Image (cartoon, rainbow, N blue to C red):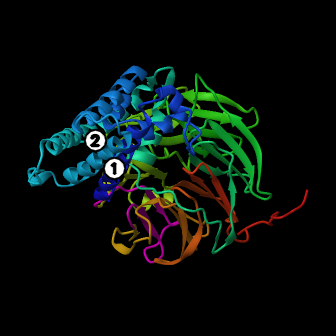
């Protein structure tokens, strides 16, 4: 999976350089940010067509301004013209030469060990090769430094400025996620699958990062995203009930959410590393915890302790440890750092019966980008560890309690789905067709079905019988990756959050308890 990310990086960046040459020489930066044909609502994404590798590095460092941007682009154009014998009479030739140089750049970048054996026959081509080699060096420096700069911005809550345009770190994260580091291509939305037609809500203007069903009202669910909105819906009628644009101590971009038990409050993680408690009835933020949670390109996981409704666990500000938060306390009660060597992507707190099976109490499961998953306690004692060869994005256990050896299982999702018996022995491994990564795993509450969301935008379902899982089919498909999903407690509805800015809803069956109000006319 790592090599797949790398190949996508190279291809995406060369395409951006071509667009930069053709569009930047005759217009100012700020005018171009608002123009062009783009599906993004934020002008920041127009930078994809304009900026070079070095400018993106400056952007992450917060040092890029409009003058530097235009000067760099003019220098690129001047160099390009000089390498083509100063032929200013034919702009089309210059653009073609620039594109050819980028093609050469691809070849040189992919064959760095060839020691420049492909020499050309004239000085003009040699000049082009030299420029390409320099460009390769800049690209390598960018990849080496980009992630560190991005983490620095996230940890400090800082902003980058381009002229009069302020860029929030979450926008840089979104740019990196969907452009430079993207292996999530845009695909066609498919609304009909094995459970019939899905409903897609276009109630957000940017990526949706989290969804969750109310623990009390089985038909009520919420969504939150990078546009700062927290929306409440009614699944029975497929309608938006309310929408709140939350501004707390400045602009807020949400990276994750979770209903608190009781259903009248929602915990929201933000791009400024805060955790907010939002009161649904008051439509207001009633609590805030500073510098306690991580904000990265993917959703921020929030887990609620099943034995204490007031306790939350989320990745801490570094992303590699955990913050324990008691909403009755004004500050986080505990910070456990360096549990993993890379970002924690998913957290689940085991109930007491599952915890006792592994020999502990209030145990926590984590899945990380350091290619491992762990079961540990709040004292950082590791009870079980699973090692893989790629990033792991989600972890869960089958819902029956207490667990039994021949029936219960533990699942970890990354580039494949790995099913373990509860004694740690691998039971089965699944590779999902057309998907490079599993983003989220979720059993129905009766345990008969497993739903998994993928980075190709598809939602898949597997039928389960004890340890056996069989692929049943595709439920529906977003045009971009699904980062989160939730199922109502009565197993009647399922909802998804996608980076295509849409929320997906589908009825997956009859409720396992109580009656249904599906389709009732009011």
At which x and y percent is residue 299? Answer: 49, 46
Q: Secondary structure at mark 2?
A: helix
* Viewer-proximal residue among 210 and 77: 77
What residue is shown at x 61% (from left), y 35% (from top)?
228
Separation of marks 1 and 2 at Cα, in angstroms: 9 Å
**Residue 415 among magenta residues:** yes
Up-down: is 35 above or below 257? above
* Viewer-proximal residue among 101 and 512: 101
Q: Secondary structure at mark 1?
A: helix
Up-down: is 349 above or below 449? above
Q: Residues within 10 Å of mark 2 (few under 14, many from 20)?
A: some
Up-down: is 143 above or below 382? above
The region drawn magenta spans 389-416
Instruction: Say if mark 1 contacts mark 2, CB within 8 Å.
Output: yes
Quadrant of the frame with the C terminus: bottom right
**Residue 466 among magenta residues:** no
Q: Residues within 10 Å of mark 1 (few under 14, many from 20)?
A: some
Residue 143 circle label: 2
């Amino acid at each position: 999976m790592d090599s797949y990310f790398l190949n996508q990086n190279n291809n995406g960046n060369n395409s951006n350089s071509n667009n930069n040459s053709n569009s930047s020489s005759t217009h100012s930066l700020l005018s171009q940010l608002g123009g062009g044909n783009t599906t993004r609502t934020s002008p920041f994404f127009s930078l994809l067509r304009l900026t070079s590798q070095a400018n993106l590095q400056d952007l992450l460092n917060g040092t890029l301004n409009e003058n530097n941007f235009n000067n760099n682009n003019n220098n690129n154009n001047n160099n390009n013209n000089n390498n083509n014998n100063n032929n200013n009479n034919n702009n089309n030739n210059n653009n073609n030469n620039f594109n050819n140089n980028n093609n050469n750049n691809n070849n040189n970048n992919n064959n760095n060990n060839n020691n420049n054996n492909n020499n050309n026959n004239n000085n003009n081509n040699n000049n082009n090769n030299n420029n390409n080699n320099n460009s390769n060096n800049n690209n390598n420096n960018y990849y080496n430094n980009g992630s560190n700069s991005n983490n620095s911005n996230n940890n400090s809550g800082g902003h980058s400025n381009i002229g009069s345009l302020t860029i929030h770190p979450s926008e840089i994260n979104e740019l990196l996620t969907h452009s430079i580091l993207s292996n999530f291509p845009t695909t066609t939305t498919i609304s009909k699958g094995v459970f019939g037609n899905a409903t897609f809500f276009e109630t957000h203007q940017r990526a949706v990062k989290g969804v969750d069903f109310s623990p009390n009202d089985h038909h009520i669910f919420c969504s939150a995203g990078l546009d700062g909105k927290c929306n409440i819906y009614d699944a029975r009628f497929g309608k938006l009930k309310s929408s709140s644009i939350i501004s707390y101590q400045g602009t807020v971009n949400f990276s994750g959410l979770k209903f608190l038990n009781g259903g009248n409050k929602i915990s929201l993680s933000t791009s400024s590393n805060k955790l907010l408690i939002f009161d649904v009835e008051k439509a207001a933020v009633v609590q805030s915890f500073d510098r306690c949670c991580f904000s990265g390109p993917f959703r921020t996981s929030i887990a609620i302790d099943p034995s204490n409704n007031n306790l939350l666990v989320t990745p801490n500000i570094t992303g590699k440890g955990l913050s324990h938060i008691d909403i009755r306390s004004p500050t986080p009660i505990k910070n456990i750092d360096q549990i993993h060597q890379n970002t924690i992507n998913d957290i689940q707190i085991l109930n007491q019966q599952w915890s006792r099976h592994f020999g502990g109490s209030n145990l926590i499961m984590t899945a990380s980008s350091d290619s491992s998953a762990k079961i540990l306690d709040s004292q950082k004692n590791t009870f079980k560890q699973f090692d893989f060869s790629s990033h792991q994005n989600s972890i869960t256990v089958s819902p029956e309690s207490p667990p039994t050896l021949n029936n219960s299982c533990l699942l970890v999702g990354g580039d494949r789905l790995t099913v373990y018996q509860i004694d740690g022995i691998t039971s089965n491994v699944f590779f999902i067709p057309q998907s490079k990564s599993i983003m989220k795993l979720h059993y129905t509450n009766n345990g008969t079905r497993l739903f998994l969301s993928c980075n190709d935008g598809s939602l898949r379902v597997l039928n389960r019988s004890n340890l056996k899982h069989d692929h049943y089919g595709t439920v529906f498909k977003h045009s971009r990756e699904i980062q989160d999903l939730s199922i109502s407690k009565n197993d009647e509805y399922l909802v998804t959050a996608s980076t295509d800015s849409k929320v997906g809803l589908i009825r997956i069956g009859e409720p396992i308890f109580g009656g249904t109000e599906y389709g009732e006319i009011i």
